[in-house]
Amino acid sequence: FSRLKKGLSRSSSKIGEGITGIFTKRKLDDEALEELEDLLISADLGVSTAGKLTANLARTRFNKDVSDEEVREALAADVTGILEPVAQPLTPDPDKRPHVVLVVGVNGSGKTTTIGKMAQLNREAGRSVVLAAGDTFRAAAIEQLKVWGERTGCEVVSGKQGADAAGLAYEALERAKDSNADLLFIDTAGRLHNKSDLMAELQKIQRVLAKLDPEAPHDVLLVLDATTGQNAVQQVGTFRELVDVTGLVVTKLDGSARGGVLVALAEQYGLPVHAVGVGESAEDLRPFEAESFARNLMG
Ligand code: GDP
């Protein structure tokens, strides 16, 4: 877990040192609880989760002497309980050939990189993978996906910048079927400022995929950038209006003190979190494990 630990170090020192600051030789009184609640809110756990966690602590320990370690332990246990139901890896169904994963999210959230990392992990597991460069809006995204394709030995189906993304997705599914691939990842554009265009595009992609396989896409993965904090939480609501999101990947937990956003996401939506990103290279996509994440988060 050393990568996760390192990745979460900013979140964990924020919360961990904050708890020590509040609870060094101190009673768990109203003032301490209020400070703790503020700390958890500022660490992006969300207002309602912060309220629940502090209330839980007060139930058993109000007006008692508590140590920072005891508070950390109690919070880590509660947070583990919140995260456990959502910590679910993305497991491709071997009977679906291919298992189709549509990847959505705003520009810059880490979609293309996450697809590259997932391609690598699945190749290592012996699966054959096809990638569709469906972010036809940005030439750089197409190039970036081709680089990942070369690196991981996956076929990349791409068109020119501005090409029709749905047509490309259709072609990619045909190719993946022809080659009996295990998995197809479809990248998409993330122009959230133009929501109706984006919705039309995502719906069209889903419509054409369903012509070849009525169950496709089997997963719709929303990629969120942890550094955007509560904005990431709002994005889930927005994307769910556009498309039937089945799971999340949260990126950029390294470089961010906002790892607590995972707890807010789990509480608010209960969507599976398939993996977390703690850096830019392939091995920086980590499985999301409730207990180790909760412990690392609490410092
Ligand atoms: P897209 O527009 O959603 O496809 O986003 P990209 O995949 O192009 O990622 C945007 C930038 O974020 C790139 O520079 C990536 O290398 C970087 N990135 C993606 N995931 C992570 C992560 O987990 N940690 C860090 N530090 N950078 C990341």
Image (spheres, grey):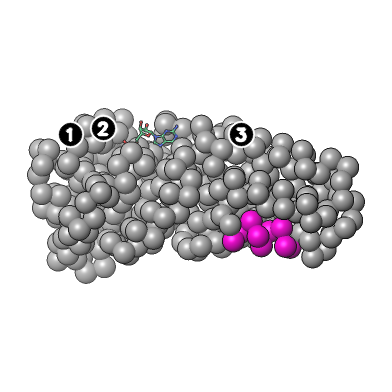
Label 1 to label 3: alpha-carbon separation: 34 Å
Q: Is residue 178 in sight in this rendering?
A: no
Residue 139 is labelled as 1
Residue 115, placed above or below residue 49: above
Contact? badges 1 and 2 (CB < 8 Å)? no
Residue that appears at 29% across and 33% down: 148
The answer to whether the residue bearing label 1 lies less than 8 angstroms from the nearest atom of ligand 1 is no
Indicate the quadrant of ligand 1 in the picture.
top left
Residue that appears at 56% across and 48% down: 44
Classify mark 1: helix, strand or loop.
helix
Q: Quadrant of the N terminus?
A: top right
**Earlier residue among tags 1 and 2:** 1
Q: Quadrant of the C terminus?
A: top right
Q: Nearer the viewer, mark 1 or mark 2?
A: 1
Specify whether 117 is left or right of 42: left
Q: Is residue 214 in sight in this rendering?
A: yes
In the image, the segment drawn in magenta is 48-56
Residue that appears at 10% across and 38% down: 160
Instruction: Report the residue marked by disc 3.
Output: 9
Quadrant of the image occupied by residue 113: top left
Specify whether 173 is left or right of 257: left
Residue that appears at 36% across and 42% down: 109
User: How far across and down, in percent of the image, does residue 110 sit?
Assistant: 36, 40
Specify whether 257 is left or right of 13: left
Label 3 to label 2: alpha-carbon separation: 29 Å
